[in-house]
Amino acid sequence: MHLIITNGYEEMSEVGALIFLETLLKKPNSRLGLATGSTPLGLYKKLTEYYKSGFVSFKNAESINLDEYVGLPEGHSQSYRLFMKENLFSKVDIDLKNTYFPDANANDLDKSSKEYSEFLKKKPQDIQLLGLGNNGHIGFNEPGTPFDSVTHKVALTKSTIMANARFFSSEKEVPSEAVTMGIMDIFRAEKIVLLASGVGKANAVKELVNDEPDTKCPASALKYHRDLTVILDTAAASLL
């Protein structure tokens, strides 16, 4: 594990973005594993700036997203596909045909989840971006998720629903299920970059960095990965 503690959210975002920039410059057709939520917004802003400055192109890259809510219609304001379009895809030259998400509206979610996992197995991510849930979840892999899990439907915990309610008009509107890459699917990535910001993440960070891997903190599985970089601000690192 490579641990980097930065002075704040802005620096954390820049350090993470530089790792993605380096990956794309070395391999323009990189497969980028991407995440949603508030944590990666600064990183996506930095990548957009690099693109607009002519430092990098996304035209040959592919993106593979971690997860998607079950039951939201395509184009819904809180769908993760729309999130990515608004915060990155529409701002750079990536081909939308090369942007992939789990099919959370399939008639057979078990079948579509298996297909997504097989897709990742055949062509794994060159780099995978992760945020960190207050309860240690990565993607929507909640506490108790087996480390050998693959893409699957998950019932979201009360704490995750409450944490995501700020993006919806009310907590009642937050979907109760999602489809997420499993921990094993995340592990297929050549490199993993995890970002964590704010004191609310400090306990999960402590469990990730200091404790033995345990399914009660899904992120702790990442200690087994061959190339993990954890980038924190001082608040998230406050219990280390």
Image (cartoon, grey):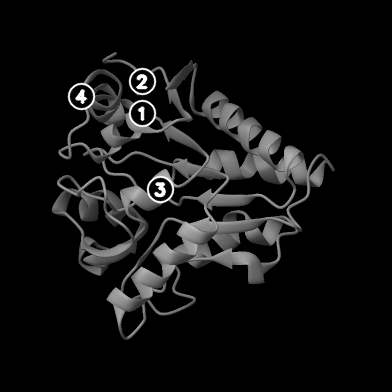
- Disc 3 target residue: 186
Marks 1 and 4, the one that precedes in the sequence: 1
Marks 4 and 3, the one that precedes in the sequence: 3
- Disc 4 target residue: 212
Disc 1 to disc 4, how far (Cα)? 23 Å
Tag 2 and tag 1, C-beta contact below 8 Å:
yes
- Disc 1 target residue: 198
Image spot of residue 67 (x, y percent): 39, 60
Please name the amino acid that badge 4 sits on: Glu
Q: Is disc 4 placed on a helix, strand or loop?
A: loop
Disc 2 to disc 4, how far (Cα)? 22 Å
Q: Nearer the viewer, mark 3 or mark 1?
A: 3
Disc 3 to disc 2, how far (Cα)? 26 Å
Q: Is residue 31 above or below residue 137?
A: below
Q: Is disc 2 placed on a helix, strand or loop?
A: loop
- Disc 2 target residue: 235
Q: Is disc 3 placed on a helix, strand or loop?
A: helix
Q: Is residue 12 left or right of residue 25?
A: left
